[in-house]
Image (cartoon, rainbow, N blue to C red):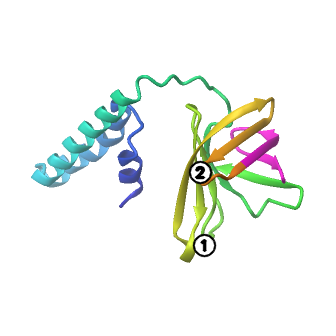
Amino acid sequence: MCFLEKKLLNCKANLSVVLKLLYPSIICMLVISNRLLKGSVVWLLVLIISCKTSNSQNQGQVNTSNDKICNFWYHSFEETNENVKVYRPSTYNFPRARAREGLEIKPNGEVIAHRIGMADEPVQIAGKWKKIRENYYEIFLQNQEKIILEIQNLSAEKMIVKNQ
């Protein structure tokens, strides 16, 4: 499954964003093949319907956070030391590594911890996060794990957290 399919199937984006992402692909398919394949049309309709359903279910949730912590952060173990743990956004150009752990912190209070499982397969653990005070956050995962983020520096390019 390609990156775009994973992002779209996670469908927390609104319908207009999905259509904007798909628009270039649809144009390319039309230009290259001069017609749409029936399977592609069915896939597109299923995707749009599932996104619309997902969005209507989430309309009751209010986005109350405009916090800079809300991002998909990967652990930059190359920059981490005994005092701090460094995270970079998922868009950062990391050096090659077998696997990388991360935190997907969402504005609605949800979090997904991306871990490295057995045989290096990715494991996702859902949970909730909350801001306790300035630069201090608690994350509670469904596996009963509690993570404390005491942030020493936070920007769009880097999050530096005190090692616990």
Give the main secondary structure, helix, strand or loop, of the magenta stretch. Answer: strand
In terms of image quadrants, where is residue 107?
top right
Q: What SS does tag 1 mark? A: loop
In terms of image quadrants, where is residue 139?
top right
Residue at 64 percent of width and 52 percent of height:
144
The quarter of the image holding the N terminus is: bottom left
- Residue 5's mark? none
Q: Nearer the viewer, residue 48 or 110?
A: 110
> Is residue 9 toward the left or the right of residue 91 in the image?
left
Q: Position of residue 25 (x, y in %)?
A: 28, 47
> Is residue 30 toward the left or the right of residue 48 in the image?
left
The span from disc 1 to disc 2 (Cα, nearest Å) is 15 Å
Residue at 40 percent of width and 46 percent of height:
10
Residue at 56 percent of width and 54 percent of height:
125
* 152 inside magenta stretch: yes
Three-letter amino acid code at disc 2? Ser
Q: Which residue in the structure is indicated by mark 1?
A: 98
* 146 inside magenta stretch: no
Disc 1 residue crowd, few under 14, some 14–19, many 20+, Cα 10 Å: few
Q: Position of residue 119 (x, y in %)?
A: 54, 77
Query: Is the residue 164 above or below the residue 132 in the image?
Result: below
Magenta residues (range): 147-164
Q: Position of residue 149 (x, y in %)?
A: 77, 44
Q: Which residue in the structure is indicated by mark 2?
A: 90
